[in-house]
Amino acid sequence: MRIMALDVGSKRIGVALSDPLKITAQGLETFQRKTLEEDVKGLWKLIDEHEVSQLVVGLPKNMDGTEGPRAELCREFAARLQQETGLPVDSIRKEIDRIRAAKRRQQQRDFQKEAVQPEKQLQPKDWSLRYTDTRSAVAEEQLIAAILGDRELAEYTQVRLDPEQFSSSFLAKVYKLTCDRLDRDLDPDPAACMMGLEPAEVQLLTHILSKYAGLRDGTEQVKQYIETIQFQYQKRTASADDPEVLLEAIRRKQG
């Protein structure tokens, strides 16, 4: 048994039909409207021919979600169709709303899952550019997004942070390009930095800048990024039993 969907207009009716398993659908035909009685008669012929068990009628709505005159005409047509055929007739808008609500719930679950596992959301798709220290990489990405295009923040960072303290060789490369421009008394322009990158690196940098485009970082935020990067660098390079590293780790966890 199949589902038949109808797009009811003032002059034409578009007809689509599902497959027997009700998984996919495709357009069947479009016919000119005549009288209501003739329209129902023509549809009844298609219903009988294709063994239709359910009807769905499109319900047009205004941009603000309210129903206008066309929606009322479609409701009247659906009611008459149900009366004549005895088949269940539903509104496609209702079905779309149900699907969208389910999709929103799934997106919310996915977002919460990624919030628990931020490294999954953070990692670049290109395996050659993937991060080994995700905690540091978050700060590195935010720092790069903050200083590219802001000379004052870039100069503030340059005298406080060395490229080798980055955990990501890609982000360190971007930082070096930024510092090179400052050394030549040039602004840290993103487009200019991209000229020194490989295509996959350009794509990743574009994604990073887009991801943090809404942030308006100042000196205080940049200082925090630098401290995080330096602390993570110290953890990666210091001895496991270094008391200063252990104490700092405890303070950060407690704070």
Image (spheres, helix red, strand yellow):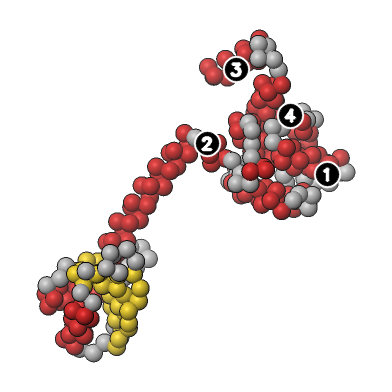
What distance separates the C-alpha of mark 1 from that of mark 2?
32 Å
Mark 3–mark 4 distance (CA, rounded to whole Å): 18 Å
- Which residue extends farthest front? 20
- First reached walking from the N terminus: tag 3 or tag 2: 2
> Which type of secondary structure does the marked residue at label 3 adopt?
helix
Instruction: Check disc 4 and give the amino acid type.
Output: Gln
Mark 4 / mark 2, whichever is N-terminal: 2
Mark 3 vs mark 1, foreground winner is 3
Secondary structure under tag 1 reads helix
Q: Judge from the rendering whether residue 201 lies leftward or rightward of residue 214; answer left or right.
A: right
Say which residue label 4 marks: 165
Residue on which disc 3 sits? 249
Q: Is residue 204 above or below residue 57?
A: above
Q: Amino acid at mark 2?
A: Pro
Which quadrant does the C terminus fall into?
top right
- Please state if 173 lies on the left or on the right of 255 as rendered: right
Where does the image place residue 250, in percent across and percent down from the top left? Answer: 57, 15
Residue plotted at (66% across, 25% down): 232
Q: Which mark is residue 181?
A: 1
Q: Are marks 1 and 4 in contact (CB under 8 Å)?
A: no
SS at circle 4: helix
Q: Which residue is mark 2?
A: 118
Residue density around tag 3, few if under 14, some if 14–19, many if 20 or more, within 10 Å: some
Q: Along the polypeptide, which appears first: circle 3 or circle 4?
A: 4
Q: Residues within 10 Å of mark 1 (few under 14, many from 20)?
A: some
Q: Secondary structure at mark 2?
A: helix
Marks 1 and 2: which is nearer the front?
2
Q: Is residue 185 left or right of residue 58?
A: right
The image shows residue 86 at horizontal and vertical percentages of 11, 72
